[in-house]
Image (spheres, helix red, strand yellow):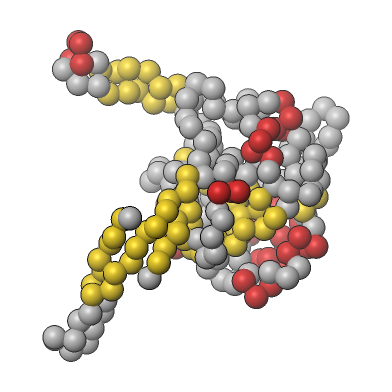
Amino acid sequence: MYPVRLKSDAKLPGMQQLVTMRIQAIVDLSVVVNANTQVYPEDPVARLQPHSTIARDGFNILAVSMGSQTGTHVDAPYHFDESAAKLDELPLARFVGTGVVVDARAAGIRGRITWDYFVGLEDQLLPGVIVLLHTGWSAHYGTENYFNNPFLDADACARLIALGVRTFGIDALNIDETPDDDHPGEGFPVHHLIADVAGVISENLTNLQAIDFPNPLVSLLPISFEAADGAPVRAVAMRVQV
Ligand SMILES: [Zn+2]
């Protein structure tokens, strides 16, 4: 559907080969950014207001205001660690890789995603992959229940890190438990574990059920904000035929 022609490296003149890579489908894993985009309690909401209009200026330009972690986004290690890497200090390879979708829909409300959910996937959990925790909690996006998200167990996170995983995503507000008046939470242990190894976390993903093909090429490339704790992402999963 979207053919892309890439020239492969070749050492000898005349030996170059053209490799055709076909992107057969692109699945959008991102929420829409508008004034109703649900944010973490007390985070900045998004505002998109006309700055220039065709009627007045001859062209349309928006003035955009939002938090660095409003909507679908990535967290850099600096989010939870003053001395850790900022967004622009990370290699872009952190944000692109083969997705491993983990079915954690059984975890449920404030459920803990333990290592049990990863059993059988060990041979796919390799350096460079992007672990996508499919909780189904995006179905609650826009409601109060969205804050009662399932979350990754710290021990399971440590095992994933030991296997070399550095990029994590979840279709929920938070990869850790979200504290509120009735739930103290655990102090964001998964954020700290991932920050400690210069890993990244993508939150507020959606539509993970639409990845119904093997080996999706996942892109979580963020806006290039300078010295940031994170940035918005147009997250996608691509079905690629090489
Ligand atoms: Zn986060």
Residue 198 found in image quarter: bottom right
Residue appearing at x 82%, y 27% in the figure: 181
For the image shown, how many numbered marks are present on the structure? 0
Residue appearing at x 18%, y 86% in the figure: 15
- Looking at the picture, how far across and down is residue 162, in whole percent? 68, 71
Q: Residue furthest bottom?
A: 12
Examine the rendered structure and indicate whether residue 26 appears above or below residue 99: above
Report the side of 53 relative to 201 (left or right): left
Examine the rendered structure and indicate whether residue 38 appears above or below residue 100: above
Residue appearing at x 55%, y 49% in the figure: 210
Report the side of 61 relative to 43 (left or right): left
Res 98 seen here: yes
Residue 207 found in image quarter: top right
Q: Residue furthest left?
A: 14
Residue 22 found in image quarter: bottom left
Report the side of 101 relative to 21 (left or right): right
Q: Residue furthest right?
A: 182
Quadrant of the snapshot with the N terminus:
bottom left
- Looking at the picture, how far across and down is residue 189, in whole percent? 74, 51
Res 227 seen here: no
- Looking at the picture, how far across and down is residue 116, in whole percent? 80, 62
Task: Please name whichever residue, 51 or 134, is drawn nearer the observer in this view of the structure.
Answer: 134
Task: Please name whichever residue, 33 or 42, is drawn nearer the observer in this view of the structure.
Answer: 33
